[in-house]
Image (tube, rainbow, N blue to C red):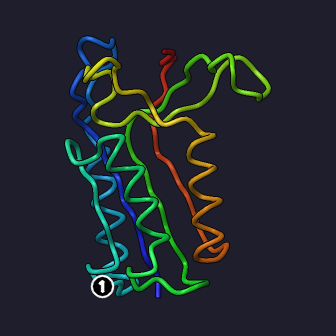
């Protein structure tokens, strides 16, 4: 019983002001993966969560990964889980307080990246955050998780 979270982002809320372009094929790629899962592997639609464009905010992406670990979602220990991301990726300076090697971290860029709200703008999702979420998911559902990304990172530094 395979479960999947498929994320595709072509349109970014603040792309023009943040200096990167919207994409043309990320949503189509995520939809092609969904089509393959449904038609070639017979994965029911109820086992596939999709987040496209404006649905794929930082908050929603993180929550969708957390939801995969929920006891109520029908995912049993050891069921395979696929997490697919198509969209922009990049690098940002690591916060000084982070105790990791290097001066930059890799990030996934959510739809609402850079959008202002309250006192702060929405940030990317750092690899360290993703790793923490996936470690927690593996504890809840077993270590049968595949994460794959198809992202554009053309010198995109934040």
For the image, the number of numbered tags is: 1
x, y percentage for residue 101? Answer: 79, 26
Q: Residue at left 39%, top 81%?
A: 72
Which residue is the site of mark 1? Answer: 44
Image quadrant where residue 14 sits: top left
The residue at the far front in this view is 118
Q: Is residue 60 toward the left or the right of residue 139 in the image?
A: left
Image vertical order of residue 99 relative to residue 145, above or below: above
Above/below status of 54 relative to 18: below
Rendering quarter of residue 31: bottom left
Mark 1: which secondary structure? Answer: loop
Q: Residue at x 58, y 77 (%)?
A: 141
Image quadrant assignment for residue 51: bottom left
Q: Give 117 or 151, whichever is nearer the viewer.
A: 117
Quick one: label 1, few (<14), some, or many (20+) residues within 10 Å? few
- Measured as percent of width and height from the top left, residue 58 is found at 36, 40
Q: Position of residue 28 (x, y in %)?
A: 26, 52
In this view, 133 is above or below 39 = above
Residue at the image position 47 percent from the left and 32 percent from the top:
89
In the image, 63 versus 101, the foreground residue is 63
Name the residue: 70% across, 26% down: 98
Query: Is residue 49 rendered to the left or right of residue 144?
Result: left
User: Where is residue 29 drawn, in percent x and y?
Assistant: 33, 53
- Depth check: 81 or 134 in front? 134
């Amino acid at each position: 019983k395979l479960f999947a979270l498929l994320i595709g982002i072509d349109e970014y809320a603040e792309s023009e002001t943040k200096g990167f372009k919207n994409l043309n094929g990320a949503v189509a790629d995520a939809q092609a993966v969904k089509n393959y899962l449904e038609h070639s592997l017979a994965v029911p639609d109820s086992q596939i969560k999709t987040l496209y464009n404006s649905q794929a905010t930082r908050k929603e992406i993180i929550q969708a990964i957390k939801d995969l670990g929920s006891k109520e979602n029908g995912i049993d220990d050891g069921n395979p889980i696929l997490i697919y991301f198509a969209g922009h990726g990049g690098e940002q300076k690591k916060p000084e307080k982070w105790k990791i090697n290097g001066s930059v971290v890799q990030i996934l860029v959510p739809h609402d990246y850079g959008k202002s709200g309250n006192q702060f703008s929405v940030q990317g999702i750092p690899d360290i955050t993703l790793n923490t979420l996936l470690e927690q998911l593996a504890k809840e559902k077993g270590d049968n998780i595949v994460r794959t990304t198809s992202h554009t990172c053309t010198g995109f530094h934040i």
